[in-house]
Amino acid sequence: MQIELELVRYDDELDKFELDETIYQLDLSEDDEKTYHLLKDSDLHLYNWLKDSDFFTKYIKEEVYLESENKKIAISDINGISFRRFYFFKVTSGDSHYEYFKKLFNIHEESDWQDREDIGEEILQCLSTKRKELILELG
């Protein structure tokens, strides 16, 4: 089985992500394909499995970013499952992103009238830590 990947590059100095607009193809072994199918509906479990897999790191270093020294990347999309909201969330992002992150970070609004910007800032604080977990350093 082959999966399609999109990546983002992380710039330490600017604390900023930039989309790598290339779609990469990665072949999975039969065992990895089984794991993929088990995890594909579990969002961050799929992300973390792939990020922590030796075959993925080897693929990135040997076929995607040959000049990988001091480079930091993160996975943007895996077969159409998008993780972009983690890197490009803004206080002005859509309602679906707010709902996703409120659930993920267990953020409760005190009332319906609570300012959306306050919730957005709380999400951004939680994301600052979460993003660091998602980054793969290619040293």
Image (cartoon, rainbow, N blue to C red):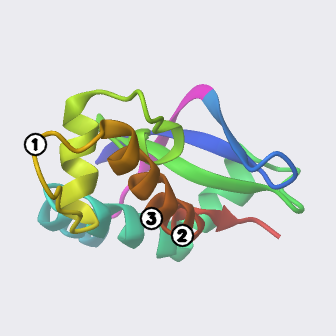
What is the distance, in whole Å, between disc 2 and disc 1 at their CAs?
A: 27 Å
What residue is pinned by disc 2? 129
Q: Residue at x 89, y 61 (%)?
A: 69
The amino acid type, in three-letter code, at marker 1 is Asp
Q: Position of residue 30 (x, y in %)?
A: 25, 65
Q: Is residue 98 above or below residue 134?
A: above
| Number of numbered tags placed on the structure image | 3
Residue 83 seen in the figure: no
For the residue carrying disc 2, how many other residues have a C-alpha within 10 Å: few (<14), some (14-19), or many (20+)? Answer: few
In the rendered view of the protein, which quadrant contains the C terminus? bottom right
> In terms of sequence position, does the residue under pointer 2 or pointer 1 come before the other?
1
> Residue at coordinates 29% horizontally, 27% vertically from top-left?
94
Nearer to me, 125 or 1: 125
Q: Which residue is mark 3?
A: 126
> Is residue 49 placed above or below 20 in the rendered structure?
below
For residue 92, say whether it is visible: yes
Magenta region, residue range: 21-29
* Residue 10 within the magenta-colored segment of the rendering: no
**Tag nearer the camera, 2 or 1:** 1
Drawn side of residue 61 relative to residue 84, left or right? right
Q: Check contact, mark 2 vs mark 1: CB within 8 A.
A: no
Q: Which residue is mark 1?
A: 112
